[in-house]
Amino acid sequence: MRKVSLHLISALLALPLLAGVSPRAASAQTPTVPEPTEESRRRLVARRALGRITVDGRLDEADWRSAPVAGDFAQARPDFLPTTRYPTEVRVLYDNEHLYVAAFNRDSAGMSSLRMPDLRRDFEPPENDVFGVTIGPMGDRRTVLQFSTTPLGSQADVQAFDGGDAFNFNWDALWRVRTTRADSGWIAEFAIPWRSLRYAPGLTSWDINFVRNTRRVAQWSAWMPYPRQLSSWRISYGGVLDSIQPPPPRTNVRVRPYVLGQRVTDKSSAAFNGSLGDVGGEVIWAPTANSLFEATVNTDFAQADVDRQVVNLTRFNVFLPERRQFFLENADLLNAGGLGSGTIGGIGGVSGRYFVQPFFTRRIGLGDDGTPQPIDAGARYAYRSGRTTAGALAMRTAALGTQGATTFGVVRGSQFFGRSTRLGSTLALRDGDVTDVNGLVSGRRNVMVAVDALSRIGELTQFTGMLSASNENGRTGLAGTYGITRNTATSLVGVLGAVVTKDYNPQMGFVSRPDVVMTNPFITWTLQPRRLPTAIVWLRHGPNAIAFNDPQSGALQEANVTYSGEVLFRNGATISPAVEYNVQRPTLPVTLFPNVQIAPGDYSYQRGGLTFRSDQSAKLATTLTTTTGAFFDGSLDRAELTARWSPSPYVSVRGAYEVNRLRSLGTRDSSFITHLAGPELRVFLNPRIQWSAFYQYNTAAERATLNARFSWEFLPLSFLYIVYNDRQAVQSGNTPLARSLIVKLSWLGQL
């Protein structure tokens, strides 16, 4: 069986070559974007505003009329073209308080052609008409800030590093934007306070780029074009903003206090019931333009997005992303490297991701089941210069249940060498007490150290690596990860890997599964034959193999080989077929569901599926994935449907539904069906006032939850929240009933 598996993997990886298909042979010549030189980079002069700028999206001040213009945008996606049919004109001004950016996005199709599914902050740029400015204020070609808006003034901001290898969409800066619309196009006017930026003192020329998405034709254009397989965050492809003169760094202190009242009914054992009030907040101090210190007391996350429930059909722990704002800000400075990609299959139902993250903030203030644990206090420090970064975090959580009060600490630093090499190191500590079922208290101290590296050859070939060790009660475990990729306009090829020993257990990190050697080679080719129908952009296909072996014996634990394709249409819709071959060799019983156990053995099976994704910017957008085939010793038919209906940007109805039909599975020959439904409604008065309700019904967990939330941003980044949560059992489940009503007022003040 092992020989058969290896032969099949080799055959699938070689299939395109054996068939004589290659990007060069099967495609028309794909235009490429050369990396700009200092001489070829475009330049724009920023002018100091002589009068007062009113941010209203009208651009009727004399300063705007006399400012230099950045125009002549090029098409960046789906293919590079030196011109675009949708011109954009950009101007930049500044004064002692703000950096101003204004864009006139011309479009003769008029207002009816604009696409905006809803008015959420941090919207999905591919689904909207968008204008954005990407700024590199550190002069290091690695650190960028991007500010984007839609024609109705929704805001999105992101920090990105190393060309997008690390990014933070949940960073929220203090800035304003206003827009106006007409039949000839739409205008966006930004005002970004200097205090919201981190910049190198004395630098008068910044890296900059301007981007636009004309969504009805799914076309991205840019002032300085960049390769389509990259993003505008790769600021080495950007232009230069000259004559910028930001003020010297000043004392920059912000306070973010909150007051909260709540009423709780919870039938869980020893849970709080009744009403209470609470206060807390944060102090944010930027002593220099490159450093930031934050302190928090009685930290609260009542307004954070709830976790999306999943039906886990794999042998791996489920990775849930961080959703709490405090931990998301400047999160990249504490990123210890590791592995966050490498798909396990490509077909829904047996797909997932293998993660090795030495440090992961969800381990602070949340139990393993997602139950919040009170955070008494904490502090964080961040430093960033052109070549050096440093970060530190210390938190203390209160005792809850069997978990005693716990102290968390992490420090990290990184240094750039040469043009494109970064080395970093991290130390993390978790120290607390645990009470067992007999009431005995035992100390628990966990220490993790890690070193990581990133290097590039040119802009398209990249190497990453990480080595880490953890120690707890005298037991030491090791982990290592690596990645080698080359990404061009017509191909993506690479290999990811990890080695994790049995005792590797970073209590401030996350590991999908220890005691394993993971290897994941992959190839993807993008084909654009000359005779391709005009409605189709490209045909993309390729194999992805992933194998898990025992570190001691080398025996295969699990393997998956997927061959998938994608047809991309001009409107952004896709059709993606896939076939896969699986090998499962558990040496111990595997429990996928309560009372459903897979016996140890050797299982080989095939599955196939198809995903259809419609135009996601249309008023009605859907994504449907269907798969079928064998599954361990039984079979699995699976369907997952997500849909959104937006009759206007002010009303959005979303829904997700997943059904799994399992037959003849496990030692009891079980057959059953699971359902997971998640309808969601959002109503907007404007981008700053909204109401949402999200309901989840999960028969696998026998649990239903409701999260309803009203939010009003009455001042920039100052909010009133009213949140209602409801949790109850469904079918024959034993989940305790819990309900809460929370009113929270938070205010951000600049001192």
Image (spheres, grey):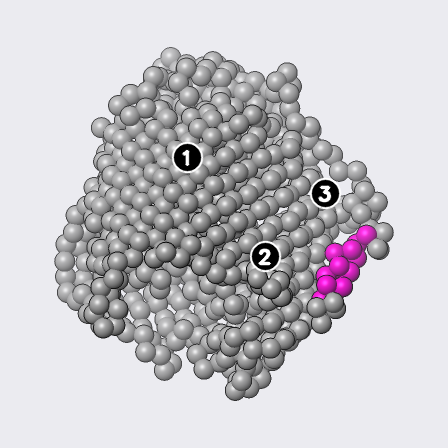
In this picture, is 480 found above or below 206?
below
Q: Residue furthest bottom?
A: 668
How far is the residue under mark 2 from the one under mark 1? Answer: 28 Å
Residue 427: x and y in percent read: 38, 43
In this picture, is 561 found above or below 634?
above
Q: What kind of residue is marked 2?
A: Met
Residue 67: x and y in percent read: 48, 16
Residue 555: x and y in percent read: 62, 66
Q: Which mark is residue 518?
A: 2
For the magenta stretch, what is the residue range? Answer: 5-17
Residue 14 magenta-highlighted: yes
Side (left or right) of 471 relative to 240? left
Q: What kind of residue is marked 3?
A: Thr
Side (left or right) of 296 relative to 38? left
In this rendering, the count of numbered labels is 3
3 or 1: mark nearer the eye: 1
